[in-house]
Image: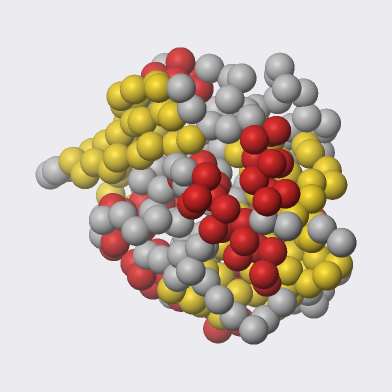
Amino acid sequence: MAEPLPQIERSNEGCGILMETMEYRNPLIAELYDVANPWGPDAEFYASLAGQPPRHVLDLGCGTGVFALGLAERGHRVTAVDPAVPMLEVAKRKPHAERVEWVEASAQSYRSTKRFDLIVMMGHAFQCLLTDTEMLGALETMHLHLKPDGRVAFETRNPRIDWRREWAGRPPRKLMLEAGEVIEKLEVESDEGEFVSFRTHYGFSDRTLTTASRLRFLSKEHVAKLMAQAGLTVVEVFGDWDGSAFDAARSREIILIAERVV
């Protein structure tokens, strides 16, 4: 079991859950991601939005399926989308995997005739999209597949927080795989305007694997503008997984709930 991170936030190093990267096409990295990202307060928050089952839920950037499988176990009808085959393979080996529709696709390219009550993009995956065009592509996918009375939900970190300083001071943590203990270390490389770049080193007994990440930090207003362009309107904004109101100066998260523009 992984030792919890401060503030209990998902790692999503490498951004493989929404983008075509080599890191998450490595089966061992996919297994590390699974261990590092268990069910947490964020998953519980999004699960509460689904309401009473059965509801149709789309999990964009499902990773190793923790959230999708948790919803399926509760009786929801879940479609889980990710471009990384090793991530999906990890998910498909878990209990209740037969209850989920697994789809290999990016958030921008996914297309289906299905329409959903709830569409979720979690794990700060939205920040892996580095241009307005990429973000709009994902948001347009959400709009296209949302039922008229459905909701979209995702989060992005508040850019007012000094994330580079926090991450630079983050101590190593231990992850346990069947093969043994792995030490995870974060190395912040640069902080340029909206972007923070870092590497994550995974130390095994005989080798070290490294993934590279670059995340984009946008204001609530910028994200809301992109959502409006995609035909979505923000109806609620929270600042933490306990449902507290968003405070631009203090909240760590920008958690957005949106509906289709009428």
* Residue drawn 45% across the image and 70% down it: 105
Q: Residue furthest left?
A: 206
Residue 199 in view, yes or no:
yes
In the shown orientation, is residue 261 left or right of residue 155?
right
* Residue drawn 64% across the image and 84% down it: 113
Query: Which one is nearer the viewer's eye here, 96 or 230?
Result: 230
Residue 95 place in picture, x, y as percent: 54, 75
Residue 71 place in picture, x, y as percent: 68, 67
Query: Which one is nearer the viewer's eye here, 205 or 138?
Result: 138
Residue 219 quadrant: top right
* Residue drawn 55% across the image and 28% down it: 6
Q: Is residue 67 above or below residue 250?
A: below
Residue 26 quadrant: bottom left
Q: Residue furthest front?
A: 229
Q: Is residue 104 above or below residue 35?
A: below
In the shown orientation, is residue 211 left or right of residue 74?
left
Residue 147 place in picture, x, y as percent: 78, 72
In the shown orientation, is residue 163 left or right of residue 172?
right
Which quadrant is the C terminus positioned in? Answer: bottom right
* Residue drawn 69% across the image and 64% down it: 143
Q: Colour scheme used in the picture?
A: secondary structure
In the shown orientation, is residue 260 left or right of residue 169?
right
Q: Is residue 156 above or below residue 119?
A: above
